Amino acid sequence: MLWRVPCLVYLPALLCATTLLAQDVLTYHNDNARTGQALSETILTTSNVNSTQFGKLFQVSVDGKVDAQPLYASTVAIPSQGVHNVLFVATEHDSVYAFDADAGKQLWKVSLLQAGENPSDKRGCGQVSPEIGITATPVIDRSSGPNGTIYVAAMSKDSSSAYHQRLHALDMTSGAEEFSGPKEVQATFPGTGDNSNGTNVIFDPAQYKERPGLLLLNHVIYTSWSSHCDDAPYTAWIIAYNEATLKQVNVLDLTPNGHEGSLWMSGAGLAADSAGYLYPLLANGTFDTTLDKNGFPSHNDYGNAFVKLSTANGGLAVADYFTMSNTVSESNADEDLGSGGVLVLPDMSDSGGVTRHLAAGAGKDQTLYLADRDNMGKFNPTADNIYQELRSGLPGGIFSMPAYFDGRLYFGPVGYNLIAFQFSNAKLQTTPVSSTSTVFSYPGATPSISANGSKDAIVWATENTNPAVLHAYDASDLSKELYNSNQAGARDHFGAGNKFITPTIANGKVYVGTTSGVGAFGLLSGPGGDFSLGVSSNGSASATVSPGQTAQYSLSLKASGVFSQSVSFTCSGAPAEASCSVSPSSATPGNSATELMVNVSTTAPSETVNLRWPGIWLGFAVLLAMLGVAVRIPTLRDRTFFVGTGKSRGPQGRRSALPSLVLLGGVVLAAALWAGCGGGASGQMTDPGTPTGTYTLTVTGNATSGSTTLTHSVTLQLVVN
């Protein structure tokens, strides 16, 4: 699960916010286009998601409601706890938790409350109750800061009854504040609308909550602000911050000379396309029906509109918009667009071969709007100038957002079935092509989709009931329900429903927030049951030894769900002249922890004879040659010539040359040995053993069943000094 994937493989219109690992879910609805797609899911299939093989694995409890979508980051190194897949959960009690996503163990928790503070009260409004803390889905940038950063907006109330909105940047491995955070949210904007001083409208933190999910685009964090019910005064704010400094870089009010028109979108984040444009749907509020020469509202008020915002040259400004011909009466009747979220669609070709850049949105008026992002349509008092609209296509209206997969849009209207619309030649067919038998009560459902590329596509949706119900449907035919969490009786119940929660799917598991925690679902047997591998609670991920000593680490292996496979272990990254082993080398984990021992044996320095073999062999060769000469040449063996006479002695007076030649060969051999050993006192060489330094070891556990392999790793540090 460690490979990196191009962010544009399946959705060309998607603009990536950050470095992404295949299974990561780092932002609301998976990507900045808000498609809800998890397209690298290789474990969950339409065959094994059923009440026999699939169900609740565990449930984590937290200190408040979970209104924000849980986020998931794979292979995160947690200090002194090893490497984990991590589930991040934010609560209305102003807490952020990090859990092991495979076993549910809490890794860290931080409170974003300052001394003497509490979460905000509900501000006289029942939309978020009984307290308001972290409502919006955070966003994560794995390349920000030393270890990756999770950005969170939180509301609180101090001992003087003053309200605060703050933007936090938390180290994703510990929860520590980064970049001198948090940053108090304060803003003004030119205008004479609600809460104006006559020159500027003023952002009052008491009058707003950050409901829409945060957006990260080109190193800028975008926050957008909702009202408490329709309790005036309020307007429509978008406030942007540099992700590395938390410095405020842009402010835009979309009803600066009017009132209301906030950004709510049932928790859906601002959508963004690959050209850097942003797309919100505004709630009911002032829309100036008097237009300037370019067709824009004369006083820059865009209540109840589908808006396109430019971020060119570091700015933030309206580039285009659409609103319906009866926009004023809709706002007056509280039938606005602001209850739904925007989905940016991939490029499509129409019947004439023209490439269309589209976005979908819907709200309370039951109409599905399909806008051309190159020409939104603006305002016409007599007709709707929009690319396509399906009037009454969404009975009950939308308090959610759609998902997209393989040419289909999936909507969950209020009090209605989950339905799928099919694209053909860049337009929607006017009636749904499939629907569920389940009717989703208020607020309907925001679906999510898992698939392995284009295969095994599953639509996931939750019912806001008590107990909550998780549903899984075949994406090709919504009438085929694969699973729901009531099918096995109480076995898979996971708590009371929460109205805007969106399922998160990653690495063979589905996570669903509730009023008190998060339920985790996955395969109950086989490799899908999964296992976790980490540093033991009483162990350490780091060890320091001298060359020749053995470093030891204690790891913990545990099953999640019903897991019956054997896990085999390997260790890599050991330095030269060292070995790493895991004991036992394989094990079958249970629900209680199995202890593993990792041993890294290093080598001490030593002295050895440094024999230079070419010199030695040369000495022996010379000696043998000399012996051969003495034995085989008769004139040297049998006769001795007298120099200058040409005469020789016979055998009786012979002097043999053999001793002299042997002596000469011995001298040569001794010299060769002396040279071959390095000569004199330098004939000994020191072996330094394992080199000093800091090394990263990786212990990997693998479990295989059929064609499916589960892999989890732990990173350890070895210091040799």
Image: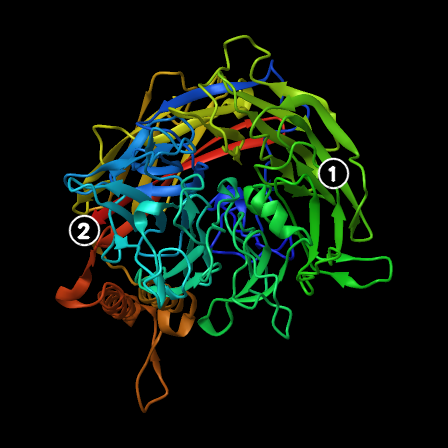
Determine which quarter of the picture holds residue 46.
Answer: top right
Residue 670 placement (x, y as % from top left): 23, 65
* Residue lying at 52% horizontally and 61% vertically, measured from the top left: 301
Instruction: Say above or below: 66 vs 52.
Output: below
Residue bearing the label numbered 2: 605
Q: Nearer the viewer, residue 200 or 361?
A: 200
Instruction: Say above or below: 136 vs 306.
Output: above
Instruction: Say above or below: 580 vs 606.
Output: above
Residue 393: numbered disc: 1
Q: Nearer the viewer, residue 424 or 99?
A: 424
Residue 607 placement (x, y as % from top left): 18, 53
Secondary structure under tag 1 reads loop
Q: Amino acid at mark 1?
A: Gly
Secondary structure under tag 2 reads loop
Q: Nearer the viewer, residue 484 or 255?
A: 255
Q: Amino acid at mark 2?
A: Pro
